[in-house]
Image (tube, rainbow, N blue to C red):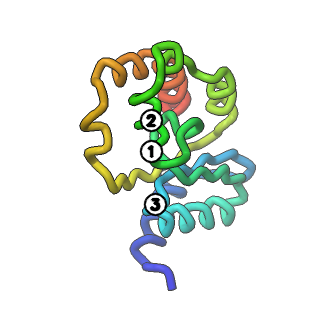
């Protein structure tokens, strides 16, 4: 049996926050720990006649590249400057196609980047800025 609070939050996200409509492509992303809410949102999107695009992994704008916990930390630890700067060209295409996005943040390790070089994090943020800007521009619409 599903927790009624989860159902309520899912309905709020789908009907109020995002206002999902039939035939929209709706990206639903979140960490595995948030599976009950992800599934409830998925169900609500289906019931609204929209097309859910489900990604369970890490949240954030880099969801396309880092679906597995720990992958992003490996990039920061072992990645060269060229690898930190690289953004696959298809990321922008995916973001352009999505009509709505619901990200469910439920991080279990809030200190995962404690030992990561801040300069590498900054470099990666600069490389991802065009994708982040595109995502935010589309979200504002």
Q: Is residue 50 left or right of residue 108?
A: right
Disc 1 + disc 2, Cβ < 8 Å: yes
Query: For the residues carrying marks 3 and 1, which lies nearer the camera in this image?
Result: 1
Q: Which residue is mark 2?
A: 74
Residue drawn where x is 46% and y is 19% of the image: 129
- x and y percentages locating residue 74 in the rendered image: 45, 35
Q: Which residue is mark 1?
A: 70
Numbered marks: total: 3
Quarter of the picture containing the C terminus is top right
Q: Nearer the viewer, residue 129 or 85?
A: 85
Q: Secondary structure at mark 1?
A: loop
Q: Is residue 104 left or right of residue 42?
A: left
Q: In the rendered view, tell whether residue 3 sits above or below residue 34.
A: below
Q: Farthest front residue? A: 78
Residue drawn where x is 68% and y is 62% of the image: 46
Q: Secondary structure at mark 2?
A: helix
Q: Which residue is mark 3?
A: 12
Q: Is residue 133 left or right of residue 22?
A: left
Q: Is residue 37 left or right of residue 112?
A: right
């Amino acid at each position: 049996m599903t927790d009624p609070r989860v159902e309520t939050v899912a309905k709020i996200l789908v009907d109020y926050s995002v206002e999902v409509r039939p035939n929209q492509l709706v990206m639903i992303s979140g960490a595995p720990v948030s599976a009950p809410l992800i599934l409830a949102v998925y169900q609500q999107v289906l019931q609204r006649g929209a097309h859910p695009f489900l990604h369970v992994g890490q949240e954030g704008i880099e969801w396309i590249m880092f679906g597995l916990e720990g992958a992003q930390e490996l990039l920061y630890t072992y990645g060269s400057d060229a690898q930190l700067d690289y953004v696959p060209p298809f990321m922008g295409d995916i973001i352009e196609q999505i009509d709505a996005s619901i990200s469910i943040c439920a991080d279990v390790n809030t200190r995962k980047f404690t030992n990561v070089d801040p300069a590498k994090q900054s470099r990666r943020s600069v490389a991802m800025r065009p994708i982040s800007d595109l995502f935010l521009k589309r979200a504002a619409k």
